[in-house]
Amino acid sequence: MTEINLLLRDLAPQVLGALLRTAGDFEASEDAVQEALLAAALQWPVDGVPLHPKAWLITVADRRRIEIWRGDAARRRREAINSALPAGEPDPRSGIDDTLTLLMLCCHPSLTPLSQVALTLRAVGGLTTAEIASAFLVPESTIGQRISRAKQRIRASGARFRLPPATEFDERIAAVRQVLYLIFTEGSTASSGTALQRVELTDEAIRLTRQLQSLVPDDGEVAGLLALMVLTDARRPARTQADGALVPLALQDRGRWDAAAIAEGTALISATLATAVVGPFQLQAAIAALHDEASTAADTDWAQIHALYLLLERLTPGPMVTLNRIVAQSMVLGPQSALEELNGLSDSLSGHHRVHAVRAHLFELSGEAAAARSEYQRAARLTRSIPEQRYLESQASRLA
C-alpha cells in the first residue's frame, strides 16, 4: 500500500466525523467522504499531497455532500474533484479527531455484530465495499446492502454524532473492542475459503486498535486487545507453508516469528497487567505471550497457561474458552482427564469442527489411533476452511 493510501486510510474516519458533526446525515456524509477519498487517490499522486490534507478532504467531501443535497451532482462533482483547499487557514474542523465517536456510532447497539463489522471497516477503516466483500468472500452486493441497512438503522434509532453519556461509555467501548476482535479473528484464521489467513483484515484490525488505544490510553482491555493481536500476528510467517498448507503451532519454525512484534506485545501486556484491572483480553494476551516466549514447543509453560485459562473461564465462561482450557489441561494432567471433560462439552459446540479436532488429538495422545482417525475425518468434513480441511485429512491419512 502506498504512503498516500495509508494516509487516506488514517484520515477517512476523521473526515467523516467532521462532516457528521455538522451535517448529522450518516449516509450522505459517508458517500461524500468516499468520493473525496477517490478524488484524492486520483489527484494527489499527480499534484502532490496538499499542505493540509485533512482539511482538503473535508472541503471536497463537504462540497460533494451539498451536491447530493441539491441534486446537481454531475456539474458539482467535476468542480469538487478539480478543486483544492482554498488559500488561507485550514478548515477549523480539521483539528478535531472524531475517530472514537465514529467507532462508537458504527458499533451502535441497534446493529448486529456483522453489520457493526462491515460499517466499521467502511466508515472507520476506509475500505471500499469491494475490498470488504473480497476479505469476507461474499458478493459485493451483499456487503453493500448490509452497510446500507446499517446506516438506515442508525438513522431510525435517532442516534446523534456524539460520545455516549458516561453511564453508557464502558458498554460502547466494549462493543468497539469486540468488533475489532472479530475483524482480527476472521483475518487470523479465516472461517472459510482457500487461504488460512486474510492479511488485509488482520492488518486493518491492528491499525484500528492502535488508533483506539491512542484515544483511550488508560483502557487496560484495549491495551490487552492490541497486545493479543500483535503477539498472535507475530506468528503469521510460520503458520503456513509456501503452498498455503497449515502448520500447527507445535511444528512451526519459531525462527520465522516476528521478534520485534513479540517484544512489543510482551512489553505492552506486562505494563498493562501491572497497572490495569485484569480483563479477558489481557488474559488472552498473557497466554499468547507465554506461547511466543517459549523457544521450543517443549518449553511452553503449560501449567501457567492452564491457570490463566481457568481464570479466563471464570471471567468470561463459554464453550470455546472451556475447549481451550481443556487443551491446556491435557498438556498438564494428561489426555484422559481432558477427554472425559470434553465429552461433557460436546453438546454446547455440536457440529463445530474444533471439538472433533481436539478429541482426535487427545485420542492420538492416548494411543487410540483408530478413534483419532475417525475424529480427524469428521472434523475435516465440518470445517469450511480449505487449509484446515487439508491438514485434518492429512492427519487422518497419517493414522491409516
Image (cartoon, rainbow, N blue to C red):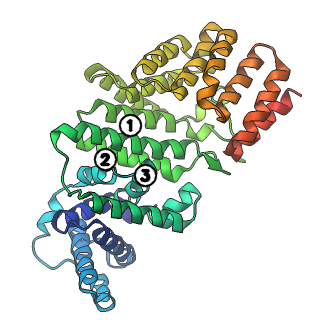
The mark that comes first in sequence, 2 or 1, is 2
Task: Provide the residue designation for mark 3.
Answer: 117
Looking at the rendered image, the quarter that the C terminus falls into is top right
The mark that comes first in sequence, 3 or 2, is 3
Numbered badge on residue 226:
1
Mark 2 lies on a secondary structure that is: helix
* As drawn, 318 above or below 167: above
Residue at 40%, 45% (x, y): give it: 179
Extreme-top residue of the structure: 333
User: Given contact means CB atoms under 8 Å apart, are the residues at marks 3 and 2 in contact?
Assistant: no
Q: Is residue 11 visible?
A: no
Q: Distance between the residues labelled 2 and 1?
A: 10 Å
The mark that comes first in sequence, 1 or 3, is 3
Q: Position of residue 130 (x, y in %)?
A: 51, 66
Q: In this view, does 379 lie to the left or right of 146?
A: right
Residue at 72%, 48% (x, y): give it: 243
Q: Distance between the residues labelled 3 and 2?
A: 16 Å
Mark 3 lies on a secondary structure that is: helix
Residue type, mark 1 in image:
Leu
Q: Residues within 10 Å of mark 3 (few under 14, many from 20)?
A: many
Residue type, mark 2 in image:
Gln
Task: Provide the residue designation for mark 2.
Answer: 211
Q: Where is residue 70 in the image (x, y as percent from the top left)?
A: 23, 85
The quadrant in which residue 73 appears is: bottom left
